Amino acid sequence: MESKLLKSSLVNKLKIEKVRKKDFEKLIKVYEEAYRDLKDYAEEGYENILKYLNWLYKQDKEGFFVAKLNDEIIGFICADKNWTKDRGEIHEFVVSPKYQGLGIGKKLFETALEYLRKSGKKCVGLWVGEKNEKAKNFYKKYGFEYKGKIKIWEKYLKKFEEVDGE
Ligand code: ACO
């Protein structure tokens, strides 16, 4: 009960905002912490991560969202509406380890899905590390389906439901 209350009060305080370039220093820290035990699937070193963040920003800065709690950035997600005509892509998704499991990821992920759906995409795709069970379970819960594998990466896709009048 107590943890449920904590969870809902935390999520109520959470703000989801568009990223700003001046946030990048903090994003590098969150990224490094989140991938500490998943190094096979991450960029390594300050310069490489910064380069990667700049690439994500260039792809689609409108779809790059940060989660803030009391003005501190504790997670981010990068949705790309420019990936293909019909398919949006989620390139990156992280929550700081001490805030994982509290519904922050859920809120970020739903913001990204809504962004892509409203951008007129018919489906959304992503790639995830083969041994990243937590993230794979997360995506399956949202109706993502396994579509194949290249090396250590598994591909997942989800079709958006058609909404009447849109
Ligand atoms: N153990 C088991 N399941 C968990 C846990 C946990 N510790 N934490 C979350 N989940 C599952 C639960 O099923 C939960 O659903 P529920 O609310 O119905 O119980 C669901 O995930 C949602 O949990 P959130 O708390 O919203 O997710 P979280 O804030 O932990 O963020 C994320 C999920 C972003 C995957 C986080 O775990 C993370 O940063 N992981 C490391 C980096 C990573 O793997 N990123 C994804 C790479 S793939 C890509 O970017 C396209």
Image (cartoon, rainbow, N blue to C red):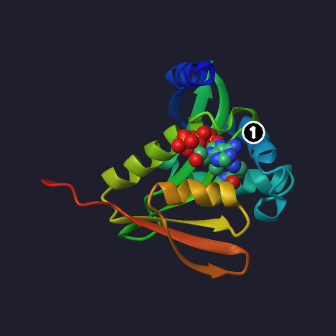
What residue appears at the point 47 percent right and 68 percent down from the top-left corner? 157
The residue beneath circle 1 is 97
Name above or below for residue 65 compared with residue 1. below
In x, y percent, where is residue 12? 50, 22
What is the count of numbered marks? 1
In x, y percent, where is residue 121? 34, 62
What residue appears at the point 87 percent right and 53 percent down from the top-left corner? 45
- Name the side, left or right, on which 165 lies relative to 126: left
Q: Quadrant of the N terminus?
A: top right
- Name the side, left or right, on which 26 lies relative to 15: right
**Image quarter of residue 48:** bottom right
- Name the side, left or right, on which 62 lies relative to 133: left
Residue that protrudes farthest toward the front in the picture: 1
Name above or below for residue 114 compared with residue 16. below
What residue appears at the point 44 percent right and 60 percent down from the top-left corner? 143
Residue that protrudes farthest toward the right in the picture: 45
Q: Assess mark 1: CB under 8 A from ligand 1?
A: yes
- Name the side, left or right, on which 147 lies relative to 46: left
